[in-house]
Image (cartoon, rainbow, N blue to C red):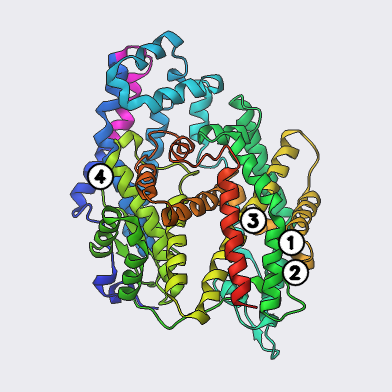
Amino acid sequence: MKKRNQIDNKFKWDLELFSTSDEIEKVFSKMEMLAKILPSYKGKLTDIDILHEYLTKFIADEIEIEKLAFYISNSLSVDKSNVEFLKLEQRFDRLYSKIGQAEAFFMPECLDFSDKYINKLENDKRFDEFKNFINKIKKQKPHRIDENSNLLLSKMSNFLGNNHTIHSIITNTEMEYEDAIDSKGNKKKIDQGNIFSCLQSSDPKLRETAFNSRMKAYSKHNKTFAELYLKDIEQDSFMTKLKNYPTLLDNVLESADVPKSVFDNVIKSVNENIPLLQEYVRHQGKVKNNKQFAYYDLFEDEKVGGKVDVEKAKSILIDSLKIMGSDYINKVSKKLNDKSIDYMPNKDKRSGAYCSDTYDAKTVILMNFTNDFNSINTLAHEMGHCINAEYYNENQSYQNAGITIFAAEIASTVNEILLNQYMLSHCKENEKSYYLHDFLDGVRSTIYRQTLFSEFELYAHEMVESEQPITYLELNQKYEELNKKYYGNSCKLPKLFKYEWSYIPHFYRPYYVYSYATGMITAITIANRIINEKGFTEKYIKFLSNGTNRPAVEILKEIGIDLTTRTPFDEAFDFIKQQLKLYKKVTK
């Protein structure tokens, strides 16, 4: 693999920040200053003028601090071995922790505000841009943590809740895999780096033995992973009780401004449409002419067309998104041409892809381009995040920019679906099955699989929260039961499948995965309306521009997508049914 300095500059991003070390040192000095000065406001926030000063005086400093975090993080992403940036990261983390401790008094003091004082804030025009902050106080007052506890938790933050780190260390450095074996009897060494390429192989024996190799490795750590996960839930349960919430789910949903009915609608609508999943999987077995079609056979990678270079990918992306209108497409064109994207893999570069933004700075995209349709799809996905960020940073104040976890994957998935539909209408007849399969398997892995995960973690949390006994045995059994419910007899489920739950890192970010399923369901509904409903694009851009100014569920309702009802869920599954019907037609 090429080193960073061997990559053509036209494929590298330019963060356009901190051209000298002096500029970095100035931000570190500001961080030191904040850590010293913030405690001087303690006990004074019931003076409305002092509160306003506290909220506004340091905004410029906060923006610069976030830019430095953005700069260090993204610089390390393209060269994880860069010692200079590793040292900067350590300095930043230490100072940021000091700031957190210095302002530990802030929220507890705000949560002690009287209703009369909060009403005074709401009627003072100076606080109009801080409406979210005021609403947060009102919402959290019943769940306040006293100052001493808050300070203690801040000091404990470096080691409390780090079970996900232990999981990652075991998974990435200590797992030992048996060799996989291909159809010719050749052994293939398995590790974290090549497991996915083996699972995607066209060789059925290699897929099977690679899958079993991974599951055997996890089975050997099954009790350890169960203990890690259950202790993580116990920590969450402790924090839930400390904050006076009935359950962690209530805490997470309230924090995200998502009604419980939305979460319930995901579970119910997906369960009602499980026969659709089984119909797709069963048909996939017929397409592959495989009477012993197993779960791991779903991973087989399919290829279409020849190699695609970066310029071709950019051209296809532009054409697929023209339906979004001139303003949106102009933003896309700009990002494709202003060195906002780091395209190529290089030694010590982070794997995968992401979009990164911070206020008053250039939004950037990291990729590892592989010269195929998957790379175009990844570019479309990350560009969705990117343009979403461009809209909310352009239209909202610093306080109201950004995006909630709940809404984060909607814009990216809309772009993927628009690209998929564009390719479907512009490809050769014999390529249609590829794009239909690509969409349908995305539905399987995102809507169905993530909802299955949601049901699993809901079970685990409810067991712990109700103080019911639960061990690795119950976790294994529940995961096996859920997969039998979802897949039925549509494919063969491996005996070792029950250990797969312990592989999923998202469980250490509780009640996060449901947002993937909701995001795709919402995105399908939005993309369908962009294609078929005149004028809907303008409504969608209103949603993209919202940031955190108002709850995402509220804005979606205003543009005609009410997730508290079943309508958008039914609309999405109707679209999925149409795509499956077409897939069965072109593959019969």
C-beta proximity under 8 Å, tags 1 and 2: yes
* Residue 196, image x, y percentages: 58, 72
Mark 2 sits on what residue?
491
- Residue shown at 57% from the left, 42% from the top: 161
Q: Secondary structure at mark 4?
A: loop
Read off the magenta span. 31-48
Residue 200 visible from this viewpoint = no
Q: Are the residues at dot 2 and dot 4 in contact (C-beta closer than 8 Å)?
A: no
Front position among marks 3 and 4:
3
In the picture, the disc for residue 459 is none
Instruction: Report which residue position mark 1 lands on.
Output: 487
Q: Quadrant of residue 433?
A: bottom right
Disc marking residue 360: 4
71 or 35: nearer the viewer: 71
In this rendering, the label closer to the viewer, 1 or 4: 1
The residue that label 3 is drawn on is 448
- Evaluate if marks 3 and 4 touch, with contact meaning CB atoms under 8 Å apart: no
